[in-house]
Image: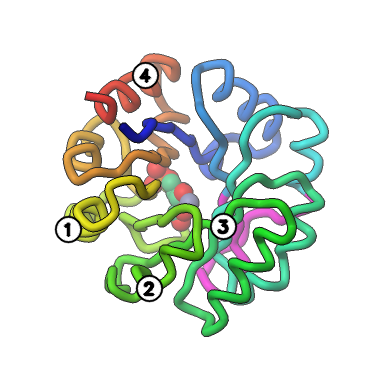
Amino acid sequence: KLKPLIGPSILNADLSRLYEESQKLLDNGADYLHLDVMDGHFVPNLTFGHPVVKCLRSKIHNAFFETHMMVANPLQWIIPMAEAGVNQYTFHIEPISNVEEVCRKIKENGMKAGIAIKPGTSVTEIAKYISISDMVLIMTVEPGFGGQKFMEDQMQKVRWLREHYPLLDIEVDGGVGPSTIESCAAAGANMIVSGTAVIGAQDQAATIKLLRDTVQR
Ligand code: DX5
Ligand code: ZN
């Protein structure tokens, strides 16, 4: 059986305390950190880039870092992110035509390659790249902002992928928390990104555990 993994997104945390917030999530049972990188082109928002990720890595040595690259030119940031200590580089297929090249370069630089689609992109668009990638991310909100409403209609993509690829790591991201995790788990997602629901929780450890236990069942 696939391992359930919970990767909190620090996007809506107090980013002036990025290290403390990240360490707290890991101490509370996070399996990995989901770092949302936005370039103001692919999405109408900005966050942070490889210099910040590198600083975080200099204080957190062992945790698995996934960068969710919401950027127009994913090829451009592969080497800087690898040098910053990123473990998995997840990028959107929508803005580019050289998905194979990007995946190859990510792996050449020692990272795992994740491929992502927005809610409007069909699952067959991404299915053709599964054999050259390590994970698929099905967005459950329009990328760009934390705290949006979970899009239930995206679960049909997750179900389709799970039916066709029993061993594939499938990640969901956007509006995922205690009230939507059942749906994600039932559809077959095993990598769970959760931002505001975990960051704002009274009891972070209990929330992370609840997410994991629901996927495990
Ligand atoms: C959205 C980001 C997500 C998001 C998660 O563009 O990719 O990672 O911030 O936050 P919540 O769980 O609050 O939707
Ligand atoms: Zn994300």
Pointer 1 with pointer 2, Cβ within 8 A: no
Image quadrant in which the N terminus is located: top left
Magenta-colored stretch includes residue 84: no
Q: Residues within 10 Å of mark 3 (few under 14, many from 20)?
A: many
In the structure shown, which secondary structural element does the residue marked by tag 3 occupy? strand
Q: Nearer the viewer, residue 110 or 16?
A: 110
Which-is-in-front pick, marks 4 and 2? 2
Amino acid at pointer 1: Gln
Pointer 1 or 2: first along the chain: 2
**Of discs 3 and 4, which sits in the foreground?**
3
> Dot 4: few (<14), some (14–19), or many (≥20) neighbours within 10 Å?
some
The residue mark sitting in front, 1 or 2, is: 2
| Type of secondary structure dominating the magenta stretch | loop
Horizontal side, residue 66 vs residue 202: left or right = right
Q: Residue at x 19, y 46 (%)?
A: 187
The disc label shown at residue 128, or none? 2
Q: Position of residue 189 (x, y in %)?
A: 30, 43
Three-letter amino acid code at the position of disc 4: Lys
Q: Quadrant of residue 62?
A: top right
The response on whether ligand 1 sits within 8 Å of label 1 is no
Nearer the N terminus, badge 3 or badge 4? Answer: 3
Q: Please determine whether, in this image, residue 4 is positioned above or below residue 151.
A: above
Q: Nearer the viewer, mark 1 or mark 4?
A: 1
- Foreground pick, 123 / 68: 123
State left or right for residue 164 relative to residue 86. Answer: left
What percent of the width, then of the height, locates residue 43? 51, 69
**Circles 3 and 2 in contact, beta carbons < 8 Å:** no
Q: In the rendered image, which residue does mark 3 sit on? A: 113
- What residue does disc 4 label? 209
Question: Relative to residue 100, is residue 181 drawn left or right?
Answer: left
Q: Which residue is mark 1?
A: 156
